[in-house]
Amino acid sequence: MSMKVTGMKCSSCGTVSYPTHAVCPSCRNETFETVVIEGEGKVLTYTDVYALAVEYETRYLRLAIVELDDGVRVTGHLLADKPKLGMRVKTTIGTVREMAEGAIQGLQFVAV
Ligand SMILES: [Zn+2]
């Protein structure tokens, strides 16, 4: 099984959003096409989030904003013990949240 994470590409200005928005953050357009989010890029910034809902199994989440090599900026889990700004990463897909209904799969980044 090959899973893909998809974002939305604005049909007007071409801005790609992930996570997705109902309205384009750049031009307010409301029509989009689906695009696959994958590839390599660099970490623009990251943060450890400790204020999690009680159903999370982990103590914190390390979230990063990554600029992919095609210029698209996406948010996902950063799987790195010693992250650095500008470090090279590639996208992967993994469990971002364990729920009673099953695991939620989402975008993750690993060092290249
Ligand atoms: Zn737009």
Image (cartoon, rainbow, N blue to C red):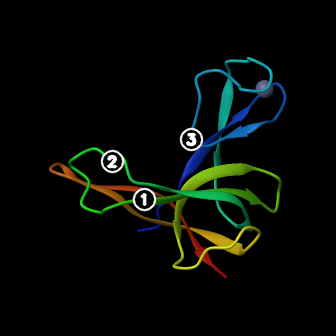
Which quadrant contains ligand 1? Answer: top right
Give the residue number, with chain letter if any, for mark 2.
52
Q: Is residue 31 above or below residue 93?
A: above
Image mark for residue 61: 1
Locate residue 102: give its quadrant.
bottom left
Q: CA distance from mark 1 to mark 3?
A: 16 Å
- Tag 3 residue: 19
Q: Quadrant of the N terminus?
A: bottom left
Tell me which residue sits at (31%, 62%) in the image: 59
In which image quadrant can residue 65 be found? bottom right
Pointer 1 or 3: first along the chain: 3
* Mark 3 Cα-neighbour bin, 10 Å: few <14, some 14–19, many ≥20: some
Say above or below: 12 vs 101: above
Tell me which numbered mark, 2 or 3, is placed earlier along the sequence: 3
Ligand 1 under 8 Å from disc 3 Cβ = no
State the residue lying farthest toward the left: 100
Asked whether the beta carbons under mark 2 and mark 1 sit within 8 Å of each other, the answer is yes
Residue at disc 1, secondary structure: strand
Percent position of residue 23, x then y: 65, 21
State the SS at label 3.
Answer: loop
Query: What is the x, y in percent for residue 35?
Result: 66, 46
Name the residue: 69% across, 66% down: 39
Task: Tell me if 71 is positioned left or right of 112 in this view.
Answer: right
The secondary structure type at the circle numbered 2 is loop
Residue type, mark 1 in image:
Leu
Question: Label 2 crowding class (10 Å Cα cut-off): few <14, some 14-19, many 20+?
Answer: few
Residue type at the position of mark 3: Pro
Kindly indicate whether the residue at mark 3 contacts the one at mark 1 (C-beta within 8 angstroms). no
Residue 70 position, x and y percent, is 82, 57
Q: Identify the mark nearer the N-term, 2 or 1.
A: 2
Among all residues in the image, which is located at the extreme bottom? 112
